[in-house]
Amino acid sequence: MRYKITNFYINKKLKFYLINILSILIFSSHVFAEPTYKMSIQDMTIEGESSVSANVYIENVGEEFELTSYQCALSINQSIDLASLKLSYVEGSSELLNAPNLYVGVENIDGVTELTFVSFIGNDIISKKTLVGKFVLEGKIDISKINLLGIKWDFEGTVSTIITGKNFENITNPESHVSLFTVEENEEEVEEEQQQSVKINITGTEASSVTGEQFTDKMLYDGITSTSNGGEYGSSSDGRWAVAGFPQWVTIDLGKETEVEKIMIDGYGSDQGITYDCEFYSGKYEERSFIKEETTDSGSNWSEHSLGKVKTRYVTVIITGSKGNDWCDIWEMEVYGISSTSEIEEGEEEIIPSEYGISQNYPNPFNPSTKVEIKMKEVGNARLDVYNILGEKVLAVLDQELSAGIHEISIDGAKLASGTYIYKLDIGNQFSQIKKMNLIK
């Protein structure tokens, strides 16, 4: 009985909000404008045998715009077990001030079950791709047939998708909404977009200057970020490239020619308002081609900089100045793009890693094959095995001697069922590392 009373209260509250927001829209003289935004469901991850998560993003197309509220409804295949479904929002995952905090859940006000999330009224300025939030859907879901969920944006009925801009004008445009869960007509375009989010392994760096062993350019890809250890790192902590004075430059080596889409920068103090002026180039510092210049974001840890899918092995970043810091002070840099099959050009010296390791597989999720890179600091026997979530070995990928260097290995999952798997690298008795990957068929 308590559950029914609570549920009734939530529904009543949601209906009250819907009536008010729809009243605003009805009395608005606004006519649909040209698309000024894109809203998408991306980055699907299998969380377990009966749950999946995905991120929802909103971004400007052209000029920045004001987002005052959003009511999002996603239809779902009505033939599955809808009574078992639960939709939840990962608290704190949204980059919006106006987070999805009025209502998140499964609704059927129109007689059709929908996944719904609604915001309070706010005034976020959308000037870049912004995370609305990470959502988790769980219930009696057949992960091996994920497309049967049939999730797509709904723009009909009382509970529908409505996006409001400045002065609560209705700027909703169905063509501006993309769902990762459904087969789109522009399937090739969606597939390409998924590939663009692949993180590329950095094999080495070279910098203009360093300050002691704890502040070298190698720290730019050591995995320690501004939020590691709960963000409890002090100004003298390891994990950053920090050097006094400007300009300073760093060249990132990706090991082979790569189609680079973007670079992410985690600057020291960025969440507190410090910004860094950056110039981006393809190629090494001595022989580089200008791409663009931008300033890192203020108020968030990470800032994203699109590089336009430039094909290069090397990316050079020159930090020319800062607002709020006398030092060039960067926690981490991450490069995203599409890895090519180009080998190291003849005559170029092969990069020998300073440590053993294995990269995150790409693409991920995958079907039916994916790739990983194994870093060997010296010759040794490498064994790579795949395990299911019960800890049972299901695939022996590699067991052989590898030379020092970076080796790209393919994992064939054609004989495996959809699900979450663990892959483990062992280098003799010297090194062991595990990572998680998702197979979707």
Image (tube, helix red, strand yellow):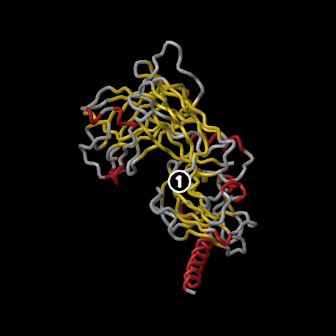
Residue 26 at x, y = what percent? 65, 70
Residue 15 at x, y = what percent? 61, 77
Point 62% across, 52% down: residue = 419
Q: Is residue 57 visible?
A: no
Name which residue type carries label 1.
Phe
Q: Nearer the viewer, residue 230 or 187?
A: 230
Q: Nearer the viewer, residue 300 or 421?
A: 421
Residue 329 at x, y = what percent? 31, 39
Point 73% across, 63% down: residue = 77
User: In the image, is residue 235 above or below residue 286?
Assistant: below
User: In the image, is residue 105 above or below residue 275?
Assistant: below
- Determine which residue is flagged by label 1: 65
Quadrant occupied by the N terminus: bottom right
- Left or right? Give the position of 154 relative to 315: right
Q: Is residue 58 visible?
A: yes
Q: Secondary structure at mark 1?
A: strand
User: In the image, is residue 170 above or below residue 252?
Assistant: below
Point 65% across, 42% down: residue = 413
Q: Residues within 10 Å of mark 1 (few under 14, many from 20)?
A: some
- Left or right? Give the position of 190 relative to 213: right
- Left or right? Give the position of 147 relative to 265: right
